[in-house]
Amino acid sequence: MTASKDKTCRVYVRNGSEFVPYGVAVGHTDAVGAVCISQRNATYLSKQSTIISGGVDLVLKRWVLPPLPTHSSVDTTTDSDPTDPSTGQKEHYLLCSHSVRGHDKDINTLASAPNDSIIASGSQDKKIKLWNSHDLSLITVLSGHKRGIWKLVFSNIDKCLLSSSGDKTMRLWSLQDYSCLRTFQGHSASVLCGKFVNSGMQVLSTSADGMLKLWTIRSGECEATYSTQHSDRIWCVATHTTMEGVVFTGSTDSSICMWNDNTVTEELEALRQTEGLLLIEQGMLNDIKNKKFDKVCI
């Protein structure tokens, strides 16, 4: 699913080794800056999958995703459907089932809960809003950030929501009582993206000064700060779906960096050094006990 400054959203499906256009959402009156799509396989199997979009026109729209073909090469379009100008292939027009004015300023980010029941939206108006995914009725408003919201991420482990803001902080919100559970402070520039890692126990964050930080949720402490190869704002961070410990960052400098988690290697090296020091210390004690003062351990 993609969102664009051409005021549309598009759905792509896999066809062999490629992704081909399948659906287009037309209806926004200005650039679309955020989009999210249903997460659960069961939602797709029950043919209830939806797309939520928002952007500069301050409006949230709910689009009904047409049933995807068993094989994406199967053509289920009609003559009245639009043709993608870049490929010449037919696309479905997506049906907009609900439309609401969501915020007072640009909508920067949208996220769908893992169970597809809640949609979270974040805006330059400093507010986070939670919506019912079925009819876009407002559930609650989360306030506390002092600048605009750049990224929202639901946890797949706990009932909580992570927000990244231009006020240089991240906040962890409870989805039970909608309170702020923790505030992560330490970045020197706007926090543009956050990502749950390590089974939801830690968070990776990126900022406008090109820094990458690792946080432990329970303590709220920053465990490590990484000076990246990026020379500009880092807008996104993603983990590999199959390779554990592999992370990607994307920046305004037009580059993507791949990171490998070397925590285990560092721990083994630290253990090796500790064992070496213990052996030296024990050797010194043995020499002193045996009055071998002519030996010097370095």
Image: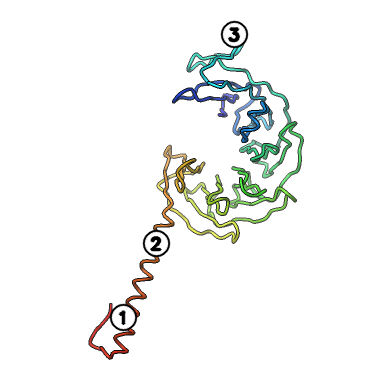
Q: Amino acid at mark 2?
A: Leu
- Local crowd size for mark 2, using a 10 Å CA cut-off: few (<14), some (14–19), many (≥20): few
**Looking at the image, is 146 positioned above or below residue 34?**
below
Q: Earlier in the sequence, mark 3 or mark 2?
A: 3
Look at the numbered disc 3 and give the secondary structure of its residue: loop
The answer to whether residue 123 is visible is no
Q: Earlier in the sequence, mark 3 or mark 1?
A: 3
**Looking at the image, is 170 positioned above or below residue 281?**
above
292 lies left or right of 97: left
Residue at left offset 48%, top offset 49%:
209
Q: Which of the numbered marks, if any, corresponds to residue 283?
A: 1
Q: Amino acid at mark 1?
A: Gly
Q: Position of residue 6 (x, y in %)?
A: 57, 24
Q: Position of residue 273 (x, y in %)?
A: 36, 68
Farthest-out residue, top = 79
69 lies left or right of 132: left
Q: Amino acid at mark 3?
A: Asp
Between the C-alphas of marks 3 and 2, the distance is 63 Å
Residue at label 2?
Answer: 268
Look at the numbered disc 1 and give the secondary structure of its residue: helix
Residue at left offset 47%, top offset 50%:
211
In the rendered view of the protein, which quadrant contains the C terminus? bottom left
- Local crowd size for mark 3, using a 10 Å CA cut-off: few (<14), some (14–19), many (≥20): few
Q: Nearer the viewer, mark 3 or mark 2?
A: 2
Q: Nearer the viewer, mark 3 or mark 1?
A: 1
Between the C-alphas of marks 3 and 1, the distance is 86 Å
In the rendered view of the protein, which quadrant contains the N terminus? top right
**Looking at the image, is 118 positioned above or below residue 18?**
below
Residue at label 3?
Answer: 79
Residue at left offset 59%, top offset 47%:
166
Look at the numbered disc 2 and give the secondary structure of its residue: helix
